[in-house]
Image (cartoon, rainbow, N blue to C red):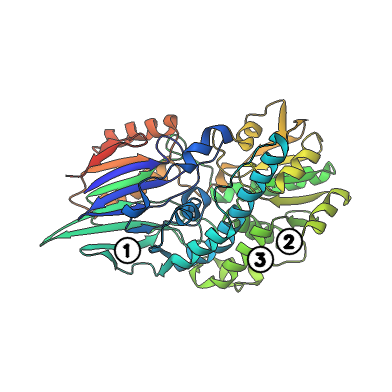
Amino acid sequence: MQLTVQGAAREVTGSCHVVQAHGHTFLLDCGLFQGRRSEVQQKNLALPVPIHQIDAIILSHAHIDHSGRLPLLVREGYAKAIHCTRATRELCEPMLADSAFIQEKDAEHLAWHKREHFEPLYGIRDATRAIELMVPHGYEERFEVAPGVFVSFSEAGHILGSASIALEVANGEHVKRLVFSGDIGRSGLPIIRDPAPPTDADWVVMESTYGNRDHESVEGARAELARVVRETAARGGRVLVPAFAVGRTQELVYDLHQLADAGEIPRIPIYIDSPLATRATQVFEHNAENFDTTETFVRHHNGTSLFQFPMLHYTPNVEDSKALSQSPGPMVIIAASGMAESGRILHHLQQGASNPRNTILVVGFMAQHTLGRRIVERRPTIKAFGIEVPLRAQVAVLNGYSAHADRTELAAWLQAVRAKSPRLKEVFLVHGEPAAQDAFGEQLRARGYRVHMPTAGTRLSLL
């Protein structure tokens, strides 16, 4: 068996790992690289392997940095199965369509401003075809992807439908299992069930996004959210939240619903200004059987009422979104994209980042070279739609809302795998920036693990 890391190698986007076994080639994820256009454009265009060599794709979850290049593979001729969980397939439908729309609009924008022809990475037809190729599976269902090669999904606890992947290769009586963590979630996250680490691993390919830090508690993040909303409303300002449309938005709605019911925030309007987040919330409502029913608030609401309460408003159409700029008084606006690289949040930042009464609330990881990272760094000016805007708004960062496990939770997840994997040999760290990955690798080596941090394109023989 051979492993080649073709994305998320010493960085946190572009997840893509090539596994070769029994003469077959499989992709674990194929996500978009995100960051400066000049740096990621060629990386996104480069195919991880020639299309004709790919026998199957196994997708861990719907986030675009894990799924976003699937339509490109389809455009280039891929026509075989894409295996995923049922909820992942449902979430990918609006997410890949939205990504295709962004690709097409970006190409139009560049062509207009640079007076050159720019080809979008892919279009809506490619996204639709990618969805048609997706084969949904249940958690813990063992299925064959090639003769002698089996796959099963286990709950990753990251977003709805997210999975860790166990790829099992049989050679006579001998069986070897490669475990890919996907993005590991946190115990106690709202709505989503806790991670269920796989077992019997010989090798683990593992994310390391927060390998050098710990988060505040989920409960502490909710209290901080309430404080930010109260203080911003008292100033007469707006809380502007760049948030991933899938996962983070629904968690924020869940907590704001609880805070509103408890009277811990003022009764100001809360807007979900994202067509994608609106559609994703509907997918959540349709998949309530995947919710964590150990949570009291989940048990007391059905799939629909969890994401509906009087203060909350969805603005799927452009006219409603534009009207927000003229609406008086304090409010909360949650809009995609999560790293503030595109979408309606750019309009709100362009109009509101210079107002010191406002707060820009950061509730997730911001990769290097993104607008979100520049906001976290509190640069004196930011750029939205090419226009320089002074950053005078307050900036609040709540790491407790991260859907990624922190270093303690990552180590606990791996220890749970190791406890039921007597043959576990090596750990390969992916999906982490160098500082986080190096710190986590050192921690794991101190605990007796053999740790590798492969760079892009490195081919590793699993012996």
Foreground: disc 3 or disc 1: 1
Q: Secondary structure at mark 1?
A: strand
Query: Please, is residue 309 above or below residue 277 in the view?
Result: below
Determine whether, in the image, residue 19 is placed left or right of residue 340.
left
Q: CA distance from mark 3 to mark 2?
A: 15 Å
Residue underneath mark 1: 152
Residue 217: % across, % down? 53, 47
> Sequence order check: which comes first, mark 3 or mark 2?
3
Location of residue 83 in the rendering, given as x and y in whole percent from the top left corner:
39, 63
Q: Amino acid at mark 3?
A: Phe
Residue annotated with mark 3: 307
Of the image marks 1 and 2, the number of the one nearer the N terminus = 1
Mark 3 vs mark 2, foreground winner is 2
Q: Secondary structure at mark 3?
A: helix
Number of numbered labels in the structure image: 3
| Residue annotated with mark 2 | 316
**Type of residue at label 1?**
Ser
